[in-house]
Image (tube, rainbow, N blue to C red):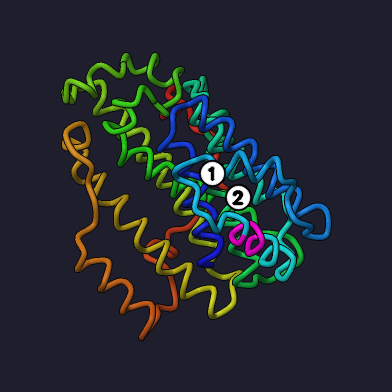
Amino acid sequence: MEIIYAYCRFTDDLADELPAAEARRYLQSWKSMIDHRLGSSFLPAPASELSVLSEAATVPKDALVLASGVAAVVKHYGIPPRYVLEVIEGVEQDIDFRPPKSFAELEQYCARVASAVGVACLYIWGFKGREVPSQAHDCGVAFQLTNILRDLREDAERGRIYIPADELNSFGCNGDDILKGVMTPAWSDLLDFQFKRTECFYQSASELFQFLSDRGRKVFGLMFSTYYALFQKLRRNKHRLFRQKLKLPRWHKIWLLARWSLAPPRSLPIVDGATNSRPPAISPSTG
């Protein structure tokens, strides 16, 4: 799990901390290096790829060590390589950012930057059955939608609006209000719509709990409870989303960690209200 986290953090930093042209070049080299390690018996990466990476100030000298660690984890746990590579593809979308036209496009982005990581984690934790539960996808979407709602202002300042364009148009909203810090009635309604849909994904995601091993339930339970608590805080304080980035207080995170480490619950916060199928595609017209 530490290696998977380091890989995601490293990949994300390449996109966020470098100019677009450099970030694009380094990510391509990083993707080539990882793909090479995953697809050719983990042979050393070509020198040309390593030389490109070594020029980046944000790339640690042990990039090869990280690449080797990722390859070892993928091989040991039988993680399909495509889930690891999809993380890079999702980050590449942020560099060449194009506002999603519809929720279908946004969901695909969420699948790459979040659901793919979640599936990789499932192979480490262990799950029941031969096929990855569909709820793993919904969990990643729920988590990423929460991140998007939390980072509305920060992303808008970078010129990124992740809320689908057709929904913005339907509710009569635009990104200027976010930068002005103005919560209009239209934006309030649009956010309610976003929260309602995200709640559906959380309900479906909670069913994933039943497919996991006991060890996996502890880790997943902590992650799910933390994200869901943050989601609830965002929902209660939506009027503040344009002015600040809301976070869970440190004491709350420590309490959740202690709870799931020492006396883990037998269910998740909303598992009793979970649906038996993945959330349907919701459109403004259906509310």
Relative placement, left or right, of 133 versus 206 is right
260 relative to 268, above or below: below
Seen in the picture, residue 141 relative to 44 is either above or below; the reply is above
Q: Where residue 116 is drawn, which disc sits there? A: 2
Decide which of 85, 167 is in the foreground and name it. Answer: 85
Mark 1 crowdedness (10 Å alpha carbons): few <14, some 14-19, many ≥20:
many
Q: Residue at x 49, y 24 (%)?
A: 97
Give the CA distance from mark 1 to mark 2: 6 Å
Q: Vertically, is 190 above or below 204?
A: above
- Image x and y of residue 72, in percent: 69, 66
Looking at the picture, does residue 31 appear above or below residue 287? below
Residue located at (39% from left, 25% from top): 160
| Residue nearest the observer in this picture, 253 or 57 | 57
Q: Which residue is mark 1?
A: 113
Using the rendered view, name the quadrant where residue 146 is placed: top left
Predominant secondary structure, magenta span: helix
Q: Would residue 133 be found to the left or right of residue 203 on screen?
A: right
Is disc 1 placed on a helix, strand or loop?
helix
Region in magenta: 65-70
Tell me, yes or no, whether the highlighted magenta stretch contains residue 149.
no
Mark 1 and mark 2 in contact? Answer it, CB < 8 Å. yes
Relative depth, front residue between 15 and 74: 15
Left or right relative to 90: residue 199? left
Q: Find residue 32 and name its label.
A: none
